[in-house]
Amino acid sequence: EWARESSPLPPIAGAEQSMGMPHPTELAGERWTPDRVWAELVQEDQAWPRYELLEGELVVTPAPKSYDHQRVIRGLLLRLHAYLEREPVGEVLFAPADIRLDPASTTQPDLFVLSVGRGAGAADWRGVTGLLLACEALSPGSRRHDRVRKRRYYAARGVADYWVVDAESRLFERNGPDERVTVHEETLLWHPAGAREPFVLDVPAFFAEELDAWPASPGASEPGGEASGDG
């Protein structure tokens, strides 16, 4: 059964500020393309900082301070991989990535599912033409972009499902191309096109298994502020 559905989320505190790591001075005012970002900034053997380009604007995100970010992504990766082994409608992967859904953008979702025929099993990122699912786990340096800019970006490009994982509040925020956000605190159900059975996630059990089995992460008790500057 579906968890409760919400009306659109209220404005985010401090939403008028960009989040993430401030742009280095030498990057300010530069004109960037996806090819230039990957040629000059991205180091494929390093996941952080994460460089993305949203409709021509450079976004730089620092590494999360809490291990909980990686724990929830790892947990989802394992569960989605097992599900897609049973329902082979796509392939689940994770950042670093080079997802180009338009000529002026390159994104690196924390976790994403490529559909058969639109990237699953492709030899390289150039074979990716769409996503079944994009997922971001919130961290203090990514809240505004994950909840506002990326939500709008993926919706405008027809991504069927976009999930934001809020480990602090232990819930999932979900939307499709219409940008209507639903909040899931009990059960998350995902039934991608072509699958016989849905993916069903017991949300409280998921967070308990991934977070409660470990000591508190460094920085986990810090207030959920946002870094100044864009990114």
Image: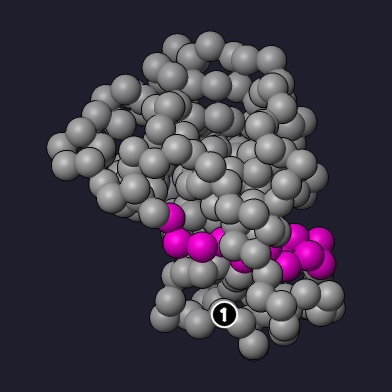
Residue 208 part of the magenta-drawn span: no
Residue 154 image position (x, y, % from top left): 70, 47
Pick out the residue farthest to the bottom.
39
The C terminus appears in which quarter of the rendering?
bottom right
Residue 1 image position (x, y, % from top left): 45, 12
Q: Vertically, is 199 above or below 87?
A: above
79 vs 177, left or right, is left
Residue 96 or residue 147, whichever sits in front: 147
Residue shown at 49%/21% (left/top)? 184
Name the kind of residue labelled 1 in the image. Answer: Val
Residue shown at 30%/31% (left/top)? 206
Residue 189 image position (x, y, % from top left): 46, 25
Residue 58 part of the magenta-drawn span: yes
Residue 80 or residue 138, whichever sits in front: 138
Specify how the rendered protein is coloured.
Answer: one colour
210 vs 97, left or right, is left
What segment is highlighted magenta in the picture?
A: 52-64
